[in-house]
Image (cartoon, grey):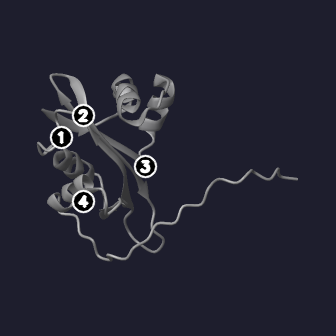
Amino acid sequence: MEVRRLDTRDAESACELAARFLELTQEPAAMRAWLADERNVAVAAFADSRPVGLAYGYLLPVPGEKADMLLLYSIDVAEGWRRRVLGTQLVEALRRYAPDSMWLLTNASNEAAMALYEQAGGERPHPDDVLFRFPARPRVPEA
């Protein structure tokens, strides 16, 4: 098992992972551009050169802080590889690229995610945190 950060040379594998886990069709050139941006961090797990897991996030600057924080945006593990510590390995691999700390949002009802993040050393500082989402509005044309 190999777990490593993806770079521009991995555009084809990243496209395969995006299609498999995110149901996202992406052109290799667009994926190469995304991977070239150092603020985008993607790590993948490979078994016999086949991608079997993906975690990615974004480095976000924090005003007044010396280091960025890493937002873990998504993590996915292929059927047959779940509950075998691969998710924890992906979280740990992603954390290596967090200059200061890493954070994420999940649902308390997502028992598998809650168990994974607790097992990986995550802490839940505020049990009453709430996420608000604002749907997109039509863009107002600039004058």
Q: Residue at x 48, y 71 (%)?
A: 63
Marks 2 and 1, how far apart at CA: 7 Å
- Local packing at callout 4 (Cα closer than 10 Å; few below 14, some 14-19, many 20+) is some
- Local packing at callout 2 (Cα closer than 10 Å; few below 14, some 14-19, many 20+) is some
Which numbered disc, 4 or 3, marks the residue closer to the eye?
4
User: 36 and 142: which one is in front?
Assistant: 142
Q: Are marks 4 and 3 in contact (CB under 8 Å)?
A: no
Marks 3 and 1, how far apart at CA: 28 Å
Check disc 3 and report its element: helix, strand or loop: loop
Q: Which residue is mark 1?
A: 82
Q: Are marks 3 and 2 in contact (CB under 8 Å)?
A: no
Residue 109 point in image, percent of width and height: 31, 60
Label whose residue precedes the other's in the sequence (3 or 2): 3
Question: Hey, what amino acid is under mark 2?
Answer: Ala
50 to 121, vertically: above or below: above
Q: Residue at x 25, y 28 (%)?
A: 51
Q: Which residue is mark 2?
A: 78
**Residue 107 falls in image quadrant:** bottom left
Residue 2 point in image, percent of width and height: 16, 33
- Local packing at callout 3 (Cα closer than 10 Å; few below 14, some 14-19, many 20+) is some
Q: Residue furthest right?
A: 143
Label whose residue precedes the other's in the sequence (4 or 3): 3
Q: Which residue is mark 3?
A: 39
Residue 13 point in image, percent of width and height: 33, 25
Q: Is residue 77 left or right of residue 89?
A: right
Residue 30 point in image, percent of width and height: 51, 29
Q: Which residue is mark 4?
A: 114
Q: Residue at x 19, y 37 (%)?
A: 3
